Image: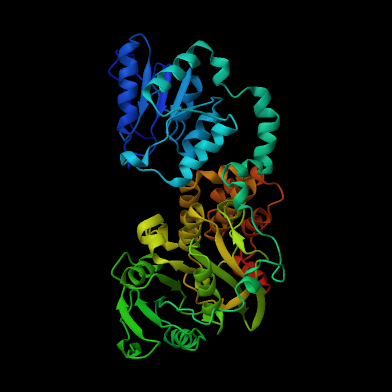
Amino acid sequence: MTEQTTTEAPTPDASDHPDVVVSLGTDHHSFDRLVRWMDDYARRHRGLRVLVQHGHSTPPRKADGTPFVPGEELGELMRRARVVVTHGGPGTILQARGTGHLPIVVPRDPELDEHVDDHQLLFVQRLEDTERVRSCTTPQQLAGLIDRALASPDEFRVSEDRQDGPDRAALRAGALIDLLTGPDEAPDSRGPGAAGSAATATAAPAADRAWPDVTVVVPTRDRPELLRRTLEAIHDQDYPGRITAIVVFDNDQPDTALARGGDARPVRVVTNSMTPGLAGARNTGVLAADTDLVAFCDDDDTWLPGKLTAQVRIMLDEPGTEMVCCGIRVVYDRVQAERVLDRTSITFADLLRSRLTELHPSTFLIRRRAMIDGCGTVSEEIPGSYAEDYELLLRLARRAPIRNIPEPGVRVLWHRRSYFSGRWQTIATALRWLLERYPEFRLVPRGYARVSGQIAFAEASAGRRGAALRWIGRTLRHRPVEGRAALALLVVCGVPPAWILRVLHLRGKGV
C-alpha cells in the first residue's frame, strides 16, 4: 500500500471513508500537477473529504481502528468513496473499475516531463472511446467531472448489470484486448508462403545495398565448448556485412584467447560490468556495442547460415521496424522439433495471450536506439533475470509490432545444464513480479492463467504445496481448461517435475 495523505482541507481521519479517492500510483514517479489540482478543489469545497494516495507512508485504518489486509486498503476505500480519480496506469484504472467506479482519469503529460509510457496514453484514449473512463486534461475539466459525479453518481458507476453481463463476459473471453491494440496492429496469420510474408517480401536484396555492421551479444558462463560452437556459427553467417561478437563473461574468468580482430568477424571479450546475471550481461554487451543493429545469441545456441541476412533485409526495407525475430529448431536428447510462427507481425496483445516461445532471445535482432533511447535496456530488476527476454519483448511490442520471419533461423539446445534448470523459487518470484508489473494481463484471462499456471508448477516443484494449490485455484478461476494447472497438480501429488519436463522437451515444448 502506498502513502495515504489528505489534502489541506480539514477532513476527518482517512479511516472515516472519504468522498473522493485520488490514486496517483507508484511512488517512483510523482504527479505534482494532479496533487495541486486536488488541493485547489479541496480548498473550494471545505466540507468534502478527500484522500490522495501517493508515496509509501503509513496506510489508513478501518473505522474500528484495525488495519486493512495488505493490498486491500486502497480498493476498500475506493469501494466506499463517492468519486475515484486516477492517473493513466492500467492497473489503477482496472482496480477502480473493479470496485464499481467509472473513474475520472488524468493522464500524465510527457511534454511536462511527467513520466509516462506511450502505451499508457493509448490505453486511456481507447478506454475513453469505449466509455469505460472519463478523462480530462485541465483543472477546470477535472473540477467539472468531480462535481458531476457527486451530483449524479449513477453516471460514474459500473452498474451491476454491466458487470454481470456483457462487460464481464467480454473480460473473460479476452475481448477487451482490442483496447490495447488498434486495427492497424492486427496479427498477420498468413503462412510463410502467403503474399506479403517476410520470406517473399525480402527475397531479393538490392544490388547496391549497403549492409550495416551488426553486433552480437553472447553472454556466457562456464560453457567453453558450447561457446566456441556458437561463435563458429556466427563467423560462418552468409551476411555480407561486418559482424562483431561481444562475448560477456558473467561470474566467470574471461577467456581472452577468444578475442579476434582485423577481419569482417571480430570477437571482443569483456566481463559483465552490470548486475550479475543474464540481464546485466546482455546490457553490458548492448552498452559496449557501437552499431545500430544489435543481436542476441545464447552461448549454447547456434545460428543457421542465412539467419542474419534475412533479418537485416527486413530492417533495411522497413526503417520503422525495431525488432525482427525468426523460428527455431529445438534439440533435446538428440530429438529435434521445429517451432515456427506462421505470422509475420507480433503485437503486444499477442504476447499477453501467449509467450510465443518461438520468439527465442537467440533470434532477436534489435535497433539499439529502440532500447537506449526508447523503452530501455534489458530489465535488471527481474528476480534472477528469469523471463527477462519475454519482458523485453513486451516493452518493445508496446512501441511497435515485432516482425517475424516464419522460418527457422536458430538451433536451440535444451539440456540439463540450462542455467534456470531447477531454480524453481526464483522462477516463481520472477513470474509474480511480471504479473505485478504488467496489470494488462488481467484483461486477458488466457494470458493470466498461463503465467499463474507456471507459478503454480514452480511452487509445486519447489515443494511449496500450499502456495502451489493457491495458484492452481487462481489459474482455474481465470481459465478452467488451462493445462498448466493440471501439471502443477501432478507435481503436488508426487510426480517428479523433471519427468514432466522431459516429456514436454521431447516434443519441443516447455511448461
Query: Could you tell me if residue 48 is visible in this image?
Result: yes
Above or below: residue 499 compared with residue 57: below
Is residue 432 left or right of 506 when viewed as pictured?
Answer: left
Residue under the image location 66 percent in, 75 percent down: 338
Above or below: residue 430 compared with residue 261: above
Measured as percent of width and height from the top left, residue 500 is found at 65, 67
Measured as percent of width and height from the top left, residue 472 is found at 62, 49
Q: Nearer the viewer, residue 282 or 107?
A: 107
Q: Nearer the viewer, residue 216 or 323?
A: 323
Is residue 225 left or right of 160 when viewed as pictured?
Answer: left
Q: Nearer the viewer, residue 201 or 378?
A: 201
- Number of dots carrying numbers: 0
Given the current orientation, which residue lies at the most extreme top position?
Answer: 47
Measured as percent of width and height from the top left, residue 166 is found at 70, 32
Query: Colour mode?
Result: rainbow
Q: Quadrant of residue 19?
A: top left
Query: Could you tell me if residue 361 is visible in this image?
Result: no
Measured as percent of width and height from the top left, residue 408 is found at 62, 76
- The quadrant of the image that shows the N terminus is top left
- The quadrant of the image that shows the C terminus is bottom right
Given the current orientation, which residue lies at the most extreme front position?
Answer: 208
Q: Nearer the viewer, residue 391 or 387?
A: 391
Q: Quadrant of residue 25?
A: top left
Residue under the image location 42 percent in, 62 percent down: 385
Is residue 339 left or right of 301 when viewed as pictured?
Answer: right
Residue under the image location 58 percent in, 77 percent down: 409
